[in-house]
Protein backbone atom coordinates (compact mmCIF):
# COMPACT_ATOMS: atom_id res chain seq x y z
CA UNK A 1 0.00 0.00 0.00
CA UNK A 2 1.29 3.45 -0.93
CA UNK A 3 1.06 5.97 1.85
CA UNK A 4 1.92 9.63 2.33
CA UNK A 5 3.01 11.54 5.41
CA UNK A 6 2.36 15.28 5.23
CA UNK A 7 5.23 17.38 6.56
CA UNK A 8 4.64 20.89 7.89
CA UNK A 9 7.23 23.32 9.20
CA UNK A 10 7.29 22.32 12.87
CA UNK A 11 6.17 18.71 12.43
CA UNK A 12 8.31 16.48 14.62
CA UNK A 13 6.65 13.05 14.52
CA UNK A 14 6.67 12.75 10.73
CA UNK A 15 9.64 10.38 10.69
CA UNK A 16 8.20 8.24 13.50
CA UNK A 17 5.01 7.90 11.50
CA UNK A 18 6.97 7.09 8.34
CA UNK A 19 8.94 4.39 10.17
CA UNK A 20 5.73 2.85 11.50
CA UNK A 21 4.09 2.87 8.08
CA UNK A 22 7.14 1.41 6.37
CA UNK A 23 7.46 -1.25 9.05
CA UNK A 24 3.87 -2.38 8.51
CA UNK A 25 3.39 -1.83 4.77
CA UNK A 26 6.93 -2.68 3.63
CA UNK A 27 6.95 0.48 1.47
CA UNK A 28 8.50 3.83 2.30
CA UNK A 29 5.82 6.52 2.48
CA UNK A 30 5.97 9.62 0.33
CA UNK A 31 6.94 12.57 2.48
CA UNK A 32 4.80 15.42 1.12
CA UNK A 33 5.77 19.02 1.96
CA UNK A 34 3.03 21.40 3.03
CA UNK A 35 3.49 23.66 0.01
CA UNK A 36 2.56 20.95 -2.50
CA UNK A 37 -0.83 21.35 -4.07
CA UNK A 38 -1.16 17.79 -5.35
CA UNK A 39 -0.80 14.42 -3.71
CA UNK A 40 1.02 11.45 -5.26
CA UNK A 41 -1.17 9.07 -7.28
CA UNK A 42 -2.41 5.74 -5.99
CA UNK A 43 -2.33 6.44 -2.27
CA UNK A 44 -4.12 4.13 0.14
CA UNK A 45 -3.60 6.30 3.21
CA UNK A 46 -2.63 9.85 4.13
CA UNK A 47 -1.12 10.50 7.57
CA UNK A 48 -0.90 13.86 9.35
CA UNK A 49 1.85 13.74 11.98
CA UNK A 50 2.32 15.17 15.44
CA UNK A 51 4.37 18.23 16.20
CA UNK A 52 3.88 21.96 16.32
CA UNK A 53 2.98 22.92 12.77
CA UNK A 54 3.67 26.61 12.14
CA UNK A 55 4.69 26.95 15.77
CA UNK A 56 1.08 26.48 16.92
CA UNK A 57 0.54 30.10 15.85
CA UNK A 58 -3.02 31.42 16.14
CA UNK A 59 -4.38 28.01 17.28
CA UNK A 60 -2.87 24.53 17.12
CA UNK A 61 -3.28 23.27 13.56
CA UNK A 62 -5.01 26.44 12.34
CA UNK A 63 -2.44 27.54 9.78
CA UNK A 64 -1.65 23.99 8.63
CA UNK A 65 -5.34 23.40 7.98
CA UNK A 66 -5.25 26.23 5.39
CA UNK A 67 -2.04 25.09 3.66
CA UNK A 68 -2.13 24.06 -0.02
CA UNK A 69 -1.52 20.37 0.61
CA UNK A 70 -4.24 20.13 3.23
CA UNK A 71 -6.78 21.43 0.71
CA UNK A 72 -5.81 18.40 -1.39
CA UNK A 73 -6.05 16.14 1.68
CA UNK A 74 -9.56 17.43 2.43
CA UNK A 75 -10.64 16.81 -1.17
CA UNK A 76 -9.21 13.27 -1.03
CA UNK A 77 -10.87 12.58 2.32
CA UNK A 78 -14.20 13.75 0.94
CA UNK A 79 -13.79 11.16 -1.84
CA UNK A 80 -13.29 8.47 0.81
CA UNK A 81 -9.49 8.31 1.12
CA UNK A 82 -8.41 6.96 4.52
CA UNK A 83 -6.74 9.72 6.55
CA UNK A 84 -5.22 9.45 10.02
CA UNK A 85 -4.19 12.47 12.07
CA UNK A 86 -2.16 11.92 15.22
CA UNK A 87 -1.81 14.61 17.89
CA UNK A 88 -1.17 17.82 15.93
CA UNK A 89 -2.64 15.91 12.97
CA UNK A 90 -5.89 15.54 14.95
CA UNK A 91 -5.83 19.27 15.70
CA UNK A 92 -5.37 19.98 11.98
CA UNK A 93 -8.31 17.71 11.09
CA UNK A 94 -10.65 19.52 13.48
CA UNK A 95 -9.48 22.87 12.11
CA UNK A 96 -10.34 21.73 8.56
CA UNK A 97 -13.81 20.71 9.69
CA UNK A 98 -13.27 17.09 8.57
CA UNK A 99 -13.74 16.17 12.23
CA UNK A 100 -16.06 18.01 14.63
CA UNK A 101 -15.03 19.76 17.83
CA UNK A 102 -11.75 21.32 18.88
CA UNK A 103 -8.69 20.48 20.98
CA UNK A 104 -8.28 22.95 23.82
CA UNK A 105 -5.50 23.57 26.35
CA UNK A 106 -5.23 20.63 28.80
CA UNK A 107 -7.43 21.21 31.80
CA UNK A 108 -4.49 20.99 34.23
CA UNK A 109 -2.48 23.37 31.99
CA UNK A 110 0.46 20.95 32.01
CA UNK A 111 2.06 19.36 28.99
CA UNK A 112 1.25 15.66 29.47
CA UNK A 113 3.89 13.24 28.22
CA UNK A 114 3.48 9.64 29.35
CA UNK A 115 1.96 6.28 28.49
CA UNK A 116 -1.79 6.26 29.05
CA UNK A 117 -4.38 3.51 29.04
CA UNK A 118 -6.83 3.78 26.19
CA UNK A 119 -10.06 1.85 25.79
CA UNK A 120 -11.14 0.80 22.31
CA UNK A 121 -14.69 2.09 22.05
CA UNK A 122 -15.51 0.92 18.55
CA UNK A 123 -13.59 -1.94 16.93
CA UNK A 124 -15.67 -1.80 13.74
CA UNK A 125 -13.71 0.98 12.03
CA UNK A 126 -10.97 0.50 9.44
CA UNK A 127 -8.55 1.85 12.05
CA UNK A 128 -9.54 -0.41 14.94
CA UNK A 129 -10.45 -3.73 13.32
CA UNK A 130 -7.49 -5.53 14.88
CA UNK A 131 -8.58 -4.53 18.37
CA UNK A 132 -11.42 -5.92 20.47
CA UNK A 133 -14.12 -3.55 21.69
CA UNK A 134 -13.41 -2.68 25.30
CA UNK A 135 -9.77 -3.72 25.03
CA UNK A 136 -7.27 -1.60 26.97
CA UNK A 137 -4.17 -0.39 25.15
CA UNK A 138 -1.08 1.38 26.44
CA UNK A 139 -0.15 4.22 24.07
CA UNK A 140 1.87 7.38 24.79
CA UNK A 141 0.49 10.88 24.73
CA UNK A 142 2.60 14.03 24.42
CA UNK A 143 0.53 17.18 24.17
CA UNK A 144 -0.41 20.50 25.70
CA UNK A 145 -3.66 20.92 23.81
CA UNK A 146 -5.51 17.63 23.83
CA UNK A 147 -8.59 18.56 25.78
CA UNK A 148 -11.35 17.53 23.37
CA UNK A 149 -14.29 19.90 23.26
CA UNK A 150 -17.57 19.71 21.37
CA UNK A 151 -21.08 20.80 22.26
CA UNK A 152 -23.38 18.29 23.95
CA UNK A 153 -25.36 17.56 20.79
CA UNK A 154 -22.18 16.78 18.87
CA UNK A 155 -20.90 14.55 21.67
CA UNK A 156 -24.22 12.69 21.79
CA UNK A 157 -24.14 12.27 18.02
CA UNK A 158 -20.55 10.98 18.06
CA UNK A 159 -21.41 8.43 20.71
CA UNK A 160 -24.72 7.48 19.11
CA UNK A 161 -23.09 6.86 15.75
CA UNK A 162 -20.21 4.85 17.20
CA UNK A 163 -17.71 7.47 16.14
CA UNK A 164 -15.68 7.47 19.34
CA UNK A 165 -12.79 5.16 18.45
CA UNK A 166 -10.73 5.53 21.63
CA UNK A 167 -11.28 6.88 25.12
CA UNK A 168 -8.83 7.52 27.92
CA UNK A 169 -9.33 4.94 30.67
CA UNK A 170 -8.76 7.75 33.21
CA UNK A 171 -8.76 11.53 33.05
CA UNK A 172 -5.69 12.70 31.12
CA UNK A 173 -6.40 16.23 29.94
CA UNK A 174 -10.01 17.08 30.72
CA UNK A 175 -11.37 15.80 27.40
CA UNK A 176 -15.15 15.72 27.13
CA UNK A 177 -16.34 12.19 27.91
CA UNK A 178 -12.65 11.16 28.00
CA UNK A 179 -12.56 11.12 24.21
CA UNK A 180 -9.10 10.37 22.80
CA UNK A 181 -9.93 9.64 19.17
CA UNK A 182 -12.90 10.01 16.81
CA UNK A 183 -13.79 9.17 13.22
CA UNK A 184 -15.79 11.17 10.69
CA UNK A 185 -19.27 10.19 9.55
CA UNK A 186 -17.84 8.29 6.57
CA UNK A 187 -15.53 6.32 8.84
CA UNK A 188 -12.47 7.04 6.66
CA UNK A 189 -10.92 9.83 8.77
CA UNK A 190 -9.51 9.22 12.26
CA UNK A 191 -8.07 11.82 14.59
CA UNK A 192 -6.45 10.79 17.87
CA UNK A 193 -4.22 12.54 20.40
CA UNK A 194 -2.22 9.44 21.51
CA UNK A 195 0.70 8.29 19.36
CA UNK A 196 0.23 4.72 18.04
CA UNK A 197 3.40 5.14 15.93
CA UNK A 198 5.41 5.18 19.15
CA UNK A 199 4.35 1.65 20.10
CA UNK A 200 5.32 -0.37 17.04
CA UNK A 201 8.28 -2.51 18.14
CA UNK A 202 9.06 -4.35 21.37
CA UNK A 203 11.94 -1.92 21.89
CA UNK A 204 9.36 0.86 22.26
CA UNK A 205 8.09 -0.85 25.41
CA UNK A 206 5.04 -2.31 23.71
CA UNK A 207 3.43 -2.92 20.35
CA UNK A 208 -0.14 -1.85 21.02
CA UNK A 209 0.04 0.77 18.26
CA UNK A 210 1.09 -1.68 15.60
CA UNK A 211 -2.29 -3.30 15.12
CA UNK A 212 -3.85 0.01 14.16
CA UNK A 213 -1.61 0.15 11.09
CA UNK A 214 -1.92 -3.59 10.42
CA UNK A 215 -5.69 -3.33 10.49
CA UNK A 216 -5.59 -0.37 8.13
CA UNK A 217 -3.36 -2.22 5.69
CA UNK A 218 -5.75 -5.16 5.72
CA UNK A 219 -8.80 -2.90 5.29
CA UNK A 220 -7.36 -0.75 2.53
CA UNK A 221 -5.15 -3.11 0.52
CA UNK B 1 -8.01 50.93 7.44
CA UNK B 2 -7.05 49.62 10.83
CA UNK B 3 -9.13 46.94 12.46
CA UNK B 4 -9.06 45.09 15.71
CA UNK B 5 -10.51 41.61 15.83
CA UNK B 6 -11.39 40.56 19.35
CA UNK B 7 -11.65 36.79 19.72
CA UNK B 8 -13.21 35.40 22.87
CA UNK B 9 -14.15 31.94 24.04
CA UNK B 10 -17.82 31.10 23.80
CA UNK B 11 -19.87 30.75 26.94
CA UNK B 12 -19.76 27.19 28.15
CA UNK B 13 -16.24 26.57 26.85
CA UNK B 14 -13.94 25.97 29.79
CA UNK B 15 -10.94 28.26 29.98
CA UNK B 16 -8.22 26.69 32.13
CA UNK B 17 -5.86 29.62 31.47
CA UNK B 18 -8.48 32.05 32.73
CA UNK B 19 -8.97 29.86 35.80
CA UNK B 20 -5.23 29.90 36.52
CA UNK B 21 -5.12 33.69 36.20
CA UNK B 22 -8.13 34.00 38.50
CA UNK B 23 -6.34 31.92 41.13
CA UNK B 24 -3.11 33.87 40.71
CA UNK B 25 -4.94 37.17 41.21
CA UNK B 26 -6.49 35.71 44.34
CA UNK B 27 -3.10 34.63 45.64
CA UNK B 28 -1.81 38.20 45.10
CA UNK B 29 -4.46 39.36 47.50
CA UNK B 30 -6.96 40.80 45.00
CA UNK B 31 -10.31 39.78 46.30
CA UNK B 32 -13.60 39.90 44.49
CA UNK B 33 -12.27 38.89 41.07
CA UNK B 34 -15.02 36.95 39.31
CA UNK B 35 -14.57 34.75 36.32
CA UNK B 36 -11.46 35.44 34.18
CA UNK B 37 -11.59 34.59 30.47
CA UNK B 38 -8.61 34.84 28.11
CA UNK B 39 -9.09 35.89 24.49
CA UNK B 40 -7.04 37.26 21.62
CA UNK B 41 -6.66 40.65 20.03
CA UNK B 42 -5.63 40.66 16.37
CA UNK B 43 -4.81 43.98 14.68
CA UNK B 44 -5.19 44.17 10.92
CA UNK B 45 -4.36 46.93 8.47
CA UNK B 46 -6.55 46.26 5.43
CA UNK B 47 -7.05 48.20 2.22
CA UNK B 48 -9.55 51.05 2.49
CA UNK B 49 -12.89 49.92 1.19
CA UNK B 50 -12.46 46.29 2.21
CA UNK B 51 -16.02 45.07 2.56
CA UNK B 52 -17.54 43.98 5.82
CA UNK B 53 -18.33 40.67 4.13
CA UNK B 54 -14.63 40.10 3.37
CA UNK B 55 -13.63 41.00 6.91
CA UNK B 56 -16.25 38.64 8.24
CA UNK B 57 -14.98 35.89 5.94
CA UNK B 58 -11.42 36.39 7.25
CA UNK B 59 -12.71 35.88 10.78
CA UNK B 60 -14.84 32.87 9.88
CA UNK B 61 -12.24 31.12 7.76
CA UNK B 62 -9.15 31.68 9.86
CA UNK B 63 -8.97 34.21 12.66
CA UNK B 64 -11.57 32.58 14.89
CA UNK B 65 -12.55 28.95 15.31
CA UNK B 66 -16.29 29.35 15.57
CA UNK B 67 -16.64 25.93 17.20
CA UNK B 68 -15.20 27.44 20.38
CA UNK B 69 -14.79 31.16 19.78
CA UNK B 70 -16.81 34.30 19.11
CA UNK B 71 -15.33 37.37 17.47
CA UNK B 72 -16.14 41.00 17.00
CA UNK B 73 -14.65 43.53 14.64
CA UNK B 74 -13.71 47.00 15.84
CA UNK B 75 -12.81 49.79 13.41
CA UNK B 76 -10.03 51.96 14.73
CA UNK B 77 -11.82 55.22 13.82
CA UNK B 78 -14.58 54.10 16.16
CA UNK B 79 -12.14 53.49 18.99
CA UNK B 80 -11.36 57.15 19.64
CA UNK B 81 -7.73 56.49 18.61
Image (spheres, coloured by chain):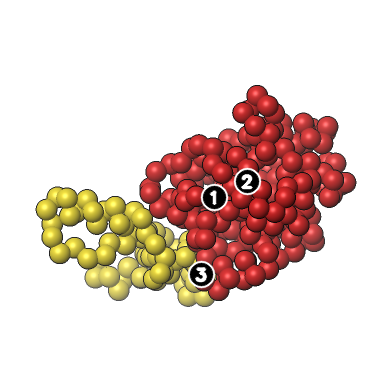
Chain colours: A red, B yellow
Spot occupied by residue B10 in the image (x, y as percentages of width and height)? 41, 69
Secondary element at tag 1:
loop
Secondary element at tag 3:
loop
Front-most of residues B47 and A171: A171
- Name the mark on residue A3: none
Which image quadrant: the N terminus of chain A?
Answer: top right
Name the chain letter of the residue that bears numbered label 3: A
Spot occupied by residue A131 in the image (x, y as percentages of width and height)? 73, 47
Q: What's the residue at 31%, 71% (across, down)?
A: B77
Badges 2 and 1, same chain = yes
Mark 2 highlights which residue?
A: A136
Q: Earlier in the sequence, mark 1 or mark 3?
A: 3
Mark 3 highlights which residue?
A: A151
Spot occupied by residue A156 in the image (x, y as percentages of width and height)? 58, 71
Q: Residues within 10 Å of mark 1 (few under 14, many from 20)?
A: some
Say left or right for A22 vs A136: right
Name the chain letter of the residue that bears numbered label 1: A
Amino acid sequence: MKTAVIVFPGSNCDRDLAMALESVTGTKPYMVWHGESELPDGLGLIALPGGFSYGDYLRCGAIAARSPVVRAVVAAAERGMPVIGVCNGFQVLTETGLLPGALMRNEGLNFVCRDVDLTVDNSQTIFTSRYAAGETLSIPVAHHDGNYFADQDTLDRLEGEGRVAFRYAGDVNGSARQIAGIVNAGGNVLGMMPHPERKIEAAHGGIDGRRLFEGLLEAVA
Amino acid sequence: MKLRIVVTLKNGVLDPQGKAIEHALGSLGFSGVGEVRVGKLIELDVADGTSDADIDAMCQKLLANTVIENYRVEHQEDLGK
